[in-house]
Amino acid sequence: MEANMTRRAFMGTIGITSAALAACGNNGASSTSGSAGNSATGDGTTITGTYTRHIQGFDWGCGIDKVTLTLSAPLDAVDPSDFDVSETKMATDFTKDSFPIVEVTIPRIVNNAVINDDGTVDLELECTPDDGDSPLTFSMITQLNTWSNPYYLTIGMAKDASLTSNGKAVSALQIETKETDTTTSADKWTIDVYSAADGTNYAFASWDPEQESKTLVVWLHGLGEGGTANTDPRVTILANKVVALSEDDFQQKVGGAHILAPQCPTYWMDSDGKMSNFQNGAIDENGTSFYTASLEELIDAHAKKVGAEKIVLAGCSNGGFMTMILSISRPGAYAAVVPICEALKNENITDEQIVSLRDLPMYFVYSKDDTTVDPTLHEIPTIDRLKAAGKTDETLHVSTTDHVVDTTGKYKDPDGNPYQYLGHWSWIYFDNNECACDTDGMKAWDFITEHVK
């Protein structure tokens, strides 16, 4: 996620909508109560329990999509309507101009309930772009995502529930509010730290295929996924669904690839490592990055470790900027690069640098309605200069769209049309291999495959 985005950009992905705030009810609910249930009284059974939670990466961000209840007594049958679930978290209030971070409690919709063979109960929770279901909190001041603290779920019986255990009516369901464990769709990735020669420490996530591979794909995240306080590299691969790169569709397409996702200690566009060019929520980009040399060192070290001979760079926004910076720094070091909604201003690229990129295979991705990184100041003039410098269709591919919309059919606007995301979010199309080159229709994943096989 990037600076200068509108309120609309953050609704449901990392913040809270006006509608959600109106539905919050008891803000600041206690996280120590641990009990919830209906108003039933009498001799019914009281069941206690705990829960684990699962975080799933979606096109629009990440959300808690499932909880698993471990109960003191088995339930005979369950229905989604039997349960009442709400989440308490810290969230940005977009109804106020100062965008304060406040504690809110938001109702969650239970889509399905299943009793497992071991007696635990899975509750599948609704997750959509407009729900406040993310365990991340976005700050308009820092422009960063952090793990919400606190974040907890209150789980109990719905008012009209009729649960039974061993044939006896259940009068109360008391579930501890603090989860006992968390799993994510990024758990198969390895989390580690690399210390560069200049003292820069990178936390990073990586993934390795079972089969031998000579390819390394490096993902460079956006501004919102950087920083090291109350965050970790899982944020870099959950907030933008980078987990797609480790899944079968991508891996089979490229013939297997190692994946590296470094987390910047601040942000890639930081020119001095002290965030001096970050003012009032915006970055004064000057075409340099403090992290260039240390990041190259990390990439080279990881490539050597996994035995990679071909390196592909891909990154969005701030990470698209860094993809361009690394390409300019060492154009011969990479088999191919995919700058997505890249944030390196054309005016900060010299003619000599343009010429140096002439033979590097490049695949640009952007949406024409991107108001965060204006294509007329970034991709469009840069691509024109690359063509003028002799770059041909063989080494230059461009995928543009008018808008960024949901293609799954799951999410609709109030009129029933496909849900429209902010124009900046063109990385969604890359994650789903839906980018198509404007001239020959080549998809981004096929472009990568062509240059690593």
Image (tube, rainbow, N blue to C red):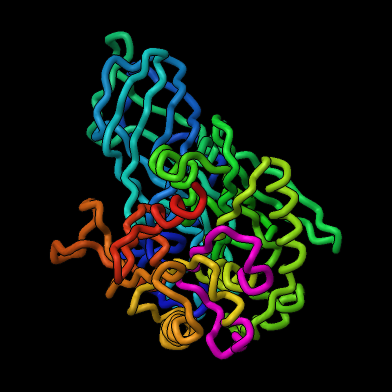
In this rendering, does residue 139 appear at all?
no
| Displayed quadrant of residue 252 | top left
Question: Residue 54, position in %: x, y?
Answer: 46, 37
Return the residue nearer the eye: 147 or 206. 206
Side (left or right) of 201 relative to 396: right
Return the residue nearer the eye: 292 or 34. 292
Question: Residue 441, position in %: x, y?
Answer: 29, 63
**Residue at the far left in the pictured view:** 415
Residue drawn at 57 percent across, 46 percent down: 215
Residue drawn at 20 percent across, 62 percent down: 418
| Displayed quadrant of residue 329 | bottom right
Residue drawn at 59 percent across, 48 percent down: 216
Q: Please determine whether, in this image, residue 106 is positioned above or below residue 317.
A: above
Q: Please determine whether, in this image, residue 283 is positioned above or below residue 259.
A: below
Residue 71 shown in magenta:
no
Side (left or right) of 444 relative to 318: left
Magenta residues span 327-354
| Displayed quadrant of residue 304 | top right
Question: Residue 272, position in %: x, y?
Answer: 76, 77
In this rendering, does residue 256 appear at all?
yes
**Residue at the far top in the pictured view:** 166
Residue 351 shown in magenta:
yes
